Amino acid sequence: MPQLDELGFILAPTVRSRAYVQFFVEQDIKPQNAFLIPGEERGWDGPDTVEVTLPNRERPFLFRPGVPARTTAERAGWKLIELPDADINSAACVARLSLPDADILIYSGLSKALLKKQTLDTGVRFLHAHGGYLPHYRGSTGFYYSLLDKGKLGMTAIWINAGIDTGDIVARRWYDPIVGLDVDYVQDPVMRAQLLADVINERLQSGHYPVVQADGVHPLHFVIHPVLKNIALDTVRP
Amino acid sequence: MPYPYTRRNLFLEPEFYEYSQFDKDLIQPEWSEQRLAFAASLEAANPPQPAEKPPSPKTEGAFELRDILSGIWRGDLDEDDFQTEMGALAALVAKFEIFRRLFKTYDGKLRKLPDAEVAAPSDYVLLARILCRECADSELSYLVSTLLKLTDMLTSLPPGTYAGEDRANLRNIIRDEQKLVETWSGRVKQDATT
């Protein structure tokens, strides 16, 4: 099992964190550690296992959206560290993140929890998967807009900086939407997980993180209106 | 159940649409019905009484939002003061999206002036007209999203808020908005079948 000592995770009790850990465990990639943000686990009332067909794979990824990230990580023998506070930017969290652990953290925090200056200044580099093809689709609902515009979901791995989705691009990919699968809780988190795992696999094989030159500067796409979101979701409805 | 996003005065209690939940079969018909009912009620409502408020004194270096919007609409915004019409429009759209309010006066960099009053509904109507035109001329779905939010705000007020020209413009905005949503909906359905 390849272990990348420079790599750690910040995980939250979210479906996205569940996808990340399950994908990395399936790929047999072990980080040095994972920080756990405290909080109540989100419920899941869908099927126990969802088959997700992804590009560049021979078999579908079997995602279990109801299994907490902590459970999967514990079973895989990951070193887990409890963060003292649900606010990732709190003084207590910043102090903990400043201790010498991993140099690079894949950030999968609570929704709307942007990293503030004091966290970005800890010396750790934060790797993030954005749900939108950057730099074209900045904003938290970027992939809904690209479903409307292009009929595709875009995902981008970036190094987080102080701007909104303006960090240096590490990798990005277009995905065809999968008809009949939930976008928010299955397709989006699993596609992000695959892109991040591909980035880490490339780091393990080549010794370097990939770099993508951003093509132009594009406006922030603000939260999509529900009527347009509904139209975008028509692309994945049977 | 009626369309959920215009049930309160959105000028007083803004809506930010985070994690919006809706019934997929109902949201579009409810939205359309709300808009058409509002357009119809504009005919019947009593017009507002003209305000007797004196104009505010002009502040040096201040630009009236109305003048900026009119310049964008006519295509003759003074480029010595503002870089481009699309740049000024993008800045105003961002302000609306972030704060859900615009002000009557700004400085040359479109920063709010101290003590600036909140813009009038009529100013938002003009912004919506501009967005209708830009959305029809472009493929920018994010501007359609902003237009929908802006029209939610405008139609969350009593129809009697609007007088003469604004009434006619608001009816046209609602008509154009319906066409835009139909166009995007049709495009997505066509893509799904090809």
Image (tube, coloured by chain):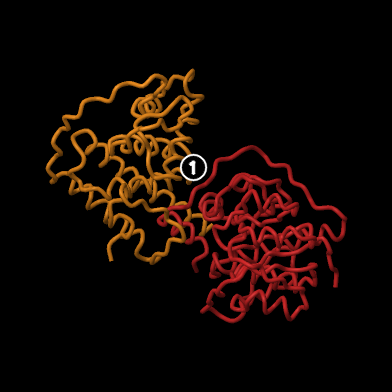
The colour applied to the residues of chain A in this rendering is: red
Residue B161, image x, y percentages: 20, 42
Q: Quadrant of residue A176?
A: bottom right
Q: Residues within 10 Å of mark 1 (few under 14, many from 20)?
A: few
For this view, does A214 lie left or right of residue A111?
A: right
Residue A120 position, x and y percent, is 68, 51
Residue that badge 1 annotates: B140
Does residue B103 appear left or right of residue A22 in this picture? left
**Colour of the chain lettered B:** orange
In this rendering, is residue A31 above or below A224?
below
Q: Quadrant of the C terminus of chain B?
A: bottom right
Q: Residue at x 38, y 53 (%)?
A: B15
Label 1: chain?
Answer: B
| Amino acid on which disc 1 is placed | Leu
- Above or below, B181 against B63 in this view is below
**Please, what secondary structure does the residue beneath circle 1 have?**
loop
Residue B89: x %, y % from top left: 45, 33
Residue B117 x, y percent position in the rendering: 32, 34
- Above or below residue A50? Residue B43 is above
Q: Is residue A53 visible?
A: no
Q: Residue at coordinates 19% horizontally, 36% vertically from top-left? A: B163
Q: Nearer the viewer, residue A4 or B31?
A: A4
Q: Give the residue drawn at x 54%, y 44%.
A: A220
